[in-house]
Amino acid sequence: ENPEFRRAPASIRVEKMFELIQSKLPGKPLFLLCILAERKNSDVYGPWKKKNLSDLGIVTQCIAPARVNDQYLTNVLLKINAKLGGLNSMLAMERSPA
């Protein structure tokens, strides 16, 4: 995030972050990993999710790692895998009651 917009409203911050992302990539990303500075109550979380998932159809995973350990990383990777249609999401569908 550009520090110049740190005090701007969350929706403006998200727009500016996305403009920066678009300027660096050749096309629309399929997945974005968002690392939040604040552990709880991040102002940009809601607008970020809405912009990417609802408005643009980009899968996201937000993390706010206070303590990163193997279990935390495993859980994050499992969530990302499921969101991208990986094997564990197919297994979950097979187990769900018909």
Image (tube, rainbow, N blue to C red):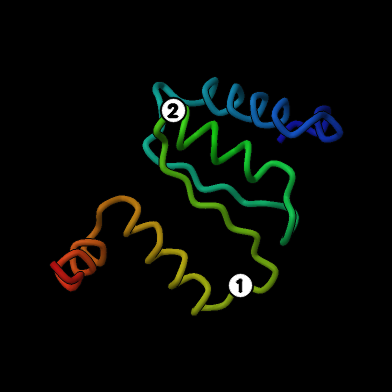
Instruction: Please state if 13 lies on the left or on the right of 79 as rendered.
Output: right
- Quadrant where the N terminus is found in the figure: top right
Instruction: Please state if 6 lies on the left or on the right of 40 as rendered.
Output: right
Quadrant in the rendering for residue 75: bottom left
**In terms of secondary structure, where does tag 2 sit?**
loop
Figure check: 85 above or below 22:
below
Figure check: 20 above or below 77:
above
Q: Residue at x 17, y 71 (%)?
A: 97
Residue under label 2: 56
Residue 57 horizontal/vertical position (percent): 39, 33
**In terms of secondary structure, where does tag 1 sit?**
loop
Badge 2: residue crowd in 10 Å (few <14, some 14–19, many ≥20):
few
Badge 2 or badge 1: first in the primary sequence: 2
Mark 2 → mark 1, Cα distance in angstroms: 30 Å
Figure check: 49 above or below 83:
above
Q: Residue furthest front?
A: 98
Residue 96 horizontal/vertical position (percent): 20, 70
Badge 1: residue crowd in 10 Å (few <14, some 14–19, many ≥20):
few
Residue 90 horizontal/vertical position (percent): 19, 62
Q: Residue at x 73, y 60 (%)?
A: 40
Disc 2 or disc 1, which is closer to the eye? 2
Judging depth in this view, the residue of 16 and 83 nearest the camera is 83
Residue 94 horizontal/vertical position (percent): 14, 68
* Amino acid type for the residue under numbered disc 2: Leu
Residue under label 1: 68
Judging depth in this view, the residue of 53 and 97 nearest the camera is 97
Quadrant in the rendering for residue 4: top right
Quadrant in the rendering for residue 8: top right
Q: Residue at x 25, y 67 (%)?
A: 88
Instruction: Please state if 68 lies on the left or on the right of 32 as rendered.
Output: right
